[in-house]
Image (cartoon, grey):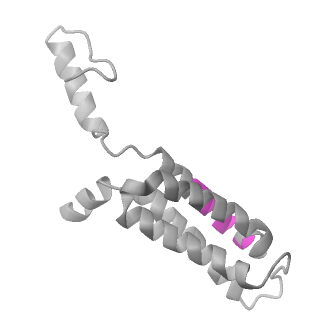
Amino acid sequence: MNGFRRWTARRPFPGGLLLVLGGAEILVTMKAPLPVILHIGMQGLAGYLLPTLMVLIGLLLLFNPAQRLFYSIIGVLLSLGTWPTSNLGGFLIGLLLGVVGSCLAFGWVPDQEPRKVRRQRRKAARAAGQPPLQAGEPA
């Protein structure tokens, strides 16, 4: 479990996972045998292509985090594109999962130390009587 935790800490895991889940949810609603499925917009290739690309971009976020900014921008655009093409973005659920996941991936900072370590460092600085370190100062 510790290896998995280290692996997820070095990449935008929540963002990539939400983007994959959003694309999968949209694909499932496209094939659902429900009488309430809406047929709005282009139901052809684009209705299946955009959620498939969302899943692919989410996996790329997980396995290639160096390009997270590009992938997250493409993920937001794909998610918003599912509104007219894929049952209103999978009845809004898939669209929201995709947009939130892409935003989380965009805001992820790879070299940020865990919050616990920052608290310990500030606490040690206060105990030593030193002013707390400001953002950007060397430790």
Q: Residue at x 57, y 70 (%)?
A: 54
Quadrant (top left/top right/bottom left/bottom right) for the N terminus:
bottom left
Q: Position of residue 101 (x, y in %)?
A: 53, 57
- What secondary structure prevails in the magenta region? helix
Q: Tell me which corner region of the image, top left, top right, bottom left or bottom right, holds residue 119.
A: top left
Query: Whole-percent x and y of residue 88?
Result: 77, 69
With 89 as the anchor, is 138 left or right in this view?
left
Above or below, comparing residue 86 to residue 111 in the picture: below
- Magenta residues span 90-100
Residue shown at the point (83%, 79%) measured from the top left:
38
Residue 5 belongs to magenta span: no
Pick the residue in front: 129 or 20: 20
Residue in the picture at 40% in, 59% down: 13
Residue 83 can be seen, yes or no: yes
Q: Position of residue 117 (x, y in %)?
A: 23, 35
Taking the spot 77% from the left edge, 85% from the top edge, the residue there is 44
Q: Is residue 136 above or below residue 114?
A: above
Q: Is residue 74 above or below residue 130?
A: below
Residue 25 seen anywhere in this rendered image of the structure:
no
- Which of the pair 34/30 is nearer the observer? 30
User: The C terminus appears in which quarter of the rendering?
Assistant: top left
Q: Is residue 57 above or below residue 65?
A: below
The quarter of the picture where residue 82 lies is: bottom right
Q: Is residue 37 left or right of residue 6?
A: right
Q: Position of residue 63 (x, y in %)?
A: 36, 66
